[in-house]
Amino acid sequence: MFQTPRGYVYSGRKNDSLIQHWGPGVRTCYILHYVIKGQGTFVCNGKAYSISVGESFLIRPFEKIEYYANENDPWSYVWLDFNGDDYATVLQKSIFCKGNCVIGKILPEQILPYFELLQKTSYPANKNAASNLALALLGKYVDIFSSHSTPKKAAYYSAACSLIATDFHKQDLNLIKICQKLHISRATLHREFIAACGMAPGSYLLKYRLEQAQFFLKAGLSIKETAYSCGFADPLYFSKVFKVHVGLAPSNFKNH
């Protein structure tokens, strides 16, 4: 664990074990958990929640909590321990803002890469990178669940945005693939995006990938790793596109 200007960040992974029992008690920080295997129980302010694979639960400072693994199917989870005003601000924009402490299923490919990167960067030498990546992780929760409240008239837009958030790292994700998965024409997809966000779907996909690339670069990934992680097959092409749209070459952005 280490201090940053935004507070502190600490991340890790707990594998299945019957010894996993904490509480009852209180924590002095936020702790976000994502369950990758098995089941368990989370008790918050006297209310018990059954937690299973793909679900997340959040511990808030000074709430009375307890959590433990299921005896027959003990859980494994990744977690992020954090504190600071910047993180609290992002939480206020997320599904956790209304006092929710448990949220529903998220696909592993949507969220695990952030936890895994944090586990590699959460030490003093990379404290700024870890802080940026922690904000990116919390921002991902905002992205994923904001589409759940989208009006029905923008259902295709919502579904496409969710697909992009899930598969942006895949090199074969393009407008043709999105239309095939949603069973709609490119004209319909284009119309939905223009109506919902004023942006063509291809531009939205590129913008999303470049936003994720910025987080990954700040987190300490190499240009090559960032390119592949964001769905670009050619790091050189990625660098050219990044410079055109961001205004800086990836190498300069990392140190900016």
Image (cartoon, grey):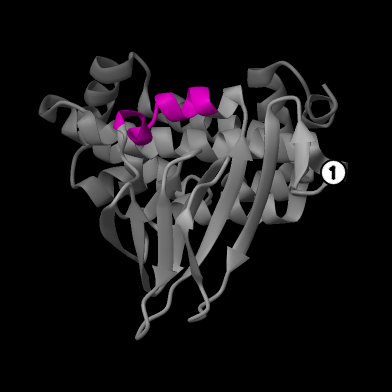
Residue 212 x, y percent position in the rendering: 58, 36
Residue 156 x, y percent position in the rendering: 21, 35
Secondary structure character of the magenta stretch overall: helix
Q: Is residue 214 above or below residue 169?
A: above
Q: Is residue 239 left or right of residue 152?
A: right
Of 16 and 164, the residue lying toward us: 16
Residue shown at 42%/69% (left/top)?
Answer: 68
Residue 3 x, y percent position in the rendering: 77, 35
Span of residues in magenta: 88-98
Q: Quadrant of the C terminus?
A: top right
Of 62 and 141, the residue lying toward us: 62
Residue shown at 31%/55% (left/top)?
Answer: 105
Question: Disc 1 marks which amino acid?
Answer: Pro
Q: Is residue 115 left or right of residue 39?
A: right
Q: Is residue 32 left or right of residue 158?
A: right
Q: Is residue 5 above or below residue 74?
A: above
Q: Which residue is mark 1?
A: 124
Residue 203 x, y percent position in the rendering: 45, 25
Instruction: Tell me the quarter of the picture where residue 73 sits.
Output: bottom left
Callout 1: SS: helix
Whether residue 191 can be seen here: yes
Whether residue 174 can be seen here: no
